[in-house]
Image (tube, rainbow, N blue to C red):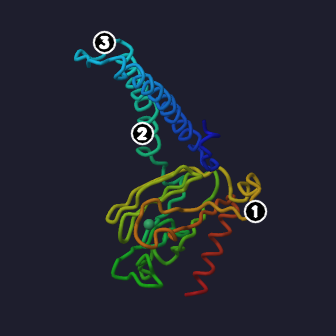
Amino acid sequence: MLNLLNLPPEASTHAAEIDHMISLVHWLMAVMFVGWGIFFVFVLVRFRKGANPRASYAGAKGKISKGTEVAVALIEIILLVGYAIPAWAKRVKELPPEGQAVVVHVVGEQFAWNVHYPGPDGKFGRTDEKLVAADNPLGLDRTDPNAKDDITTINQLNIPVDRPVLVYLSSKDVIHSFGLYEMRVKQDAIPGLQIPVWFIPSVTTDDMRKQLNKPDFDYEITCSQLCGLGHFRMRGFVTVQTAGEYQKWLDDQEKELKASN
Ligand SMILES: [Cu+2]
């Protein structure tokens, strides 16, 4: 089924589980589509006017229809209780401990993704909407001691492979949706709320390029919620790196920040 669905490659530890669920739901839909289709044709023939000049007011008497309805309901309950609810509990309700995870803030706006790293001190600096300007889209208060080393990027999220990444999502204007297809991550970004979403990337960008044999492949952040006229160009990139490469990237950002001060 998954081959037929032609889903993007899997690049997070929970992706296979999500795909398994998608596959099961599609199998159920496929069986029901074919089943109901056959039943529809059967009914057209069986109850044609020529064979039934007078309508029957009693309705169907067979047990098959009730049996199928119960079976479909049971399968749906199994999918919900056995797969969807446990997956939700594990994926959404439980967060990785912040000490182990890479924590970033991502703020959507029309039409870009602002990324905020806490810097070497691990503390996010204060942000204030009054400070928002063209060169400070996050409204970061650089006079705050915690903000001095904070790294910010636009449309570029660098993360290390095989470590939990905990993203706190919010939005400056309208509802956006943070979609990382290869990671099987999708979460709305809502103004006034800070919503956590987490995953463990399992394949670096370089390895994925080799795997797909596409040297210019990049993981993307897609806005998955129609958010305005520029929605189509609200597109960011995710670079999944080895621990060493990621540390080097952070150091480079830090150097750049110091140089600009
Ligand atoms: Cu958007």
For the C terminus, give its image quadrant: bottom right
**Residue type at the position of mark 1:** Pro
Residue type highlighted by circle 3: Lys
Instruction: Determine crowd level at label 2: few under 14, some 14-19, many 20+ residues with C-alpha closer than 10 A.
Output: few
Image mark for residue 89: 2
Camera-side residue: 163 or 85?
Answer: 85
Q: Is residue 114 above or below residue 194?
A: below
Mark 1, residue position: 215
In contact (CB < 8 Å): disc 1 and disc 2: no
Q: Which residue is denoted by mark 3 in the rendering?
A: 61
* Quadrant, the N terminus: top right
Residue nearest the observer in this picture, 171 or 101 = 171
Disc nearest the viewer among 3 and 1? 3
C-alpha separation, residue under disc 3 versus residue under disc 2: 43 Å
Q: Position of residue 112 (x, y in %)?
A: 48, 72
Dot 1: what SS? loop
At x 42%, y 22%, the residue is 45
Percent of width and height locating residue 126: 39, 73
Q: Amino acid at mark 2?
A: Ala
**Is residue 68 found left or right of 219 in the rendered image?**
left
Q: Quick check: which quadrant has ligand 1?
A: bottom left
Residue 5 location, x and y as percent? 59, 43
Q: Is residue 167 visible?
A: yes
* Label 3 vs 1, first from the N-terminus: 3
Query: Crowding at label 1, few (<14), some or many (≥20) Cα neighbours within 10 Å?
Result: few
At mark 3, the secondary structure is loop
- What residue is rendered at 46% in x and 38% in y? 87
